[in-house]
Image (tube, rainbow, N blue to C red):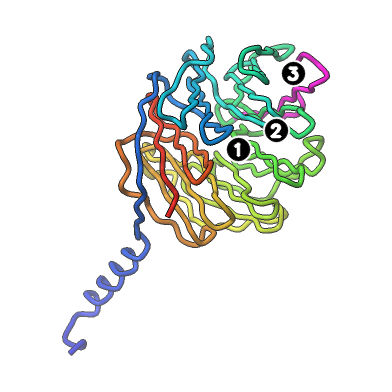
Amino acid sequence: MLKNIPLLYILLICLCWLISCKIDRSDYNAMMHQLPTELDLTDVCFVNNDTGFVSAGGLFTNGIVLRTNNGGVSWDTVMLNNQGVNSISYRNQFLTISESGSKLHTSSDLTNWSLNYVNQGWWGWHNHVRLNDNRVYLVGGENFGRGTIHVKDPNHNYTILKDTFEHELRDIELTSERTLFAVGYGLIMKSTDEGNSWIISNIQGDFFRGVDFPSSNTGYVVGEYGSVYKTTNRGNSWSQCRAGNSIFADQSKLLRDIAFLDENKGFIVGTGNQVFKTEDGGKTWMEVLNLDGYADFYSLSIYNNKAYLAGNKGQLLVLDLNP
């Protein structure tokens, strides 16, 4: 009977079946929260089940830091800034906030704040990380051009330029082995001496926006054009586990961040309401469909079986990851 069916028709049926297998989708319980700001949210950090912080603002806007003490039900203002706040972290009982230009704020009690400046100039910081010895590393750069790393030593009241690179840097991560990873425009870099020297991988071809290590051995990076790379040997080598899109793809839908609950289960988010998940260590990715509302997502944080997605115009989407 099949010989009576044109071969092209059979091929089309097979192609459609293959495509449908690749667009399997998964649902989560989701709730969109409108925070008391119209600024774009840039980062989310939770200290415990109840207390969390959100930063907001851009390169050409004011900035704000919001706090919740009831798990995200309500938010109040902790800090107002003249410049956008691009990243926020909590380590060693210090809350650290970096602005887009040249200011770094630190507090251990959320009442008294220390303010540190770079000695000279204005810098386009994008993200930061606090080391176990309380040094703070900040990565940045501008317009796909020169990338920078600054460091704030706890023994000094100023921040200095530590290193420069050919391309813009966007994210930095500290693993449990006291190893640093930084990513940016065509760059995945590793430091085994806490930032004194860097090894650049041979991976190219995407603007890497986020890096996450759920364990000291296994880590992932995501590029804004869709590619995801994975390492299982502490960053000594990387393999692609999600192919990227063409640079001529829809520019309104670009990936922005990545975070994992464990070595196998993780998420990537982006503009145009994009949320994808994997449960098999990046072998397959499924779109999360039943989102509450619509947003451009810029940052992702996972804490206590909840995923917090920082969106534009003060929107924070919370996904319940409990089965």
Q: Which residue is mark 1?
A: 184
Three-letter residue code for mark 1? Gly
What type of secondary structure mainly makes up the magenta span?
Answer: strand
Q: Residues within 10 Å of mark 1 (few under 14, many from 20)?
A: many
Tell which circle, 1 or 2, labels the residue nearer the N-terminal end.
Answer: 2
Which mark, by number, is residue 165? 2
Whether tag 1 and tag 3 are in contact, CB under 8 A, the answer is no
Q: How far across and how far down the image is residue 51, in percent?
A: 53, 29
Residue 33 locus on image (x, y percent): 36, 30
Which kind of residue does numbered mark 3 sit on? Thr
Which residue is disc 3 drawn over?
Answer: 159
Which span is picked out in magenta? Answer: 145-165
The answer to whether 10 appears left or right of 23 in the picture is left
Q: As drawn, is 23 to the left or to the right of 117?
A: left
Residue at 72% of width from left, 41% of height from top?
180
- Residue 130 occupies quadrant: top right
Question: Is 146 included in the stretch rendered in magenta?
Answer: yes
The amino acid on which the numbered mark 2 sits, given as a three-letter code, is Phe
Q: Are marks 1 and 2 in contact (CB under 8 Å)?
A: yes
Mark nearer the N terminus (1 vs 3): 3
